[in-house]
Image (cartoon, rainbow, N blue to C red):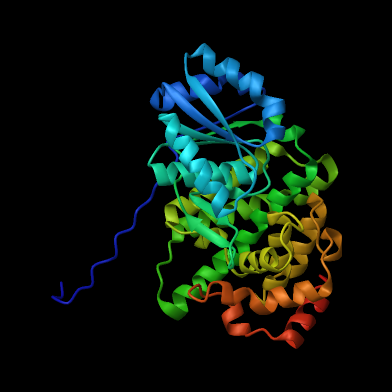
Amino acid sequence: MTKNHDHMKSHRMELPRLIEIGEKNIGDFGRFLESLNNPKKVSLISGTNVQKVLKKSIEKSLKSKKIQFIWHTSKDNQITSLNQMEKDVKKDRSDLVAGIGGGRSVDTAKMISYSLEKPFVSLPTAASHDGMASPFVSVKSDKPHSIVASAPMGVFVDIDVIKKAPIRLLASGCGDLVANIIAVKDWELGHKKTNEYYGRYAADLAMMSAKIVMENSSEFAKKGLDARVIVEALISAGVASCIAGSSRPCSGAEHLFSHALDKIVPNVGLHGEKCGIGSIMMAKLQGGDWKKIVQTLKDVGAPTTAKQIGLSSDYVIEALVIAQDLRPDRYTILKEAKMNNKKAKELAKVTKVI
């Protein structure tokens, strides 16, 4: 043992304590919360549409376990809105914060529970990305990006609710999973170039989540998307990020491309759709099988071109050029490619994204 032996940096893993996946089980939500930490009062954060569909079932379930509740309506992910809702939730003096809905409501609950140091539970109503089980939140700002918050104490999924969401959302979830192939290779690259921490287990788990979609895509094309398989893969991907202690296993250059589009043209295309399209181009840069990614995305019904989600060629080119600048600290294939307008246009054209 050398005297100058470097101690490994502390590495903290915060994982969900309990995950429940069922079908037509929304009536068990109260029992699920009771088994988690037996809360007396909960703050529920969701959008208006979700409240219209699920409010009665959730309230009945909570009342059956004598759990008090207060609803809060999530409108957007702007910092001012989050700050106001945090003040409102603080007044509840609740034991737990639940995010019920798609990405925005779950992200909002995640952020607020983290700030208020309260346990957080995720009840996703759509499987459009891996945020349902991860500790990361998408923030809209000058430089859209993800920040670390709380991993959920529990994740509760009713597959019947997921199936009722538009099929486009499930296809978007597949796009977010395919992105893990790029993210893991970028993480390995970053480790080689900067000696940053690389966790083999987290990387393998994220890659396995991607392979589940890649290997089953032709079956999905024939028989339709299997919501349960996709949900379990998205939860595994979220857990991979929890284990890694960063979004590295699930977020590489393809996510930077998606974040760049969020900056240039907000609210055009779903997160997973943009990550899927980004994955096609980044796979080409990495020397990977980008055509297989194109086929997989086509099989699951996810877009493979900018036009399909209403993006012009100019926006794609600009996003490729500025993507790496959004997170200069994160080493990805874009650091090596050093994008300019000409290179970006060639890449987008050769992969038929534009």
How many numbered marks have been drawn onto this rendered protein structure? Answer: 0
Instruction: Estimate the x, y position of residue 311 in percent, counting from the top left.
Output: 82, 65
Instruction: Estimate the x, y position of residue 312 in percent, counting from the top left.
Output: 84, 70
Quarter of the view holding residue 267: bottom right
Q: State whether residue 284 appears in this view.
A: no
Please give left or right for residue 294 compared with residue 135 in the image.
right
**Residue farthest along the left direction in this orientation:** 3
Q: State whether residue 277 appears in this view.
A: yes
Q: Is residue 6 above or below residue 62?
A: below
Give 215 or 141, whichever is nearer the viewer: 141
Give 220 or 103, whichever is nearer the viewer: 103
> In percent of the image, x 50 and y 72: which residue is there?
330
Q: Is residue 351 above or below residue 241?
A: below
Pick the quarter of the image with the N terminus: bottom left
Instruction: Estimate the x, y position of residue 98 in percent, counting from the top left.
Output: 52, 34
> In percent of the image, x 13 and y 75: which residue is there?
3
Please give left or right for residue 318 compared with residue 82 in the image.
right
Please give left or right for residue 73 compared with residue 274 in the image.
left
Instruction: Estimate the x, y position of residue 277 in percent, counting from the top left.
Output: 74, 64
Pick the quarter of the image with the C terminus: bottom right
> In percent of the image, x 68 and y 79: which residue is there?
321
Please give left or right for residue 39 compared with residue 203 in the image.
left
Give 333 or 294, whichever is nearer the viewer: 333
Give 134 or 73, whichever is nearer the viewer: 73
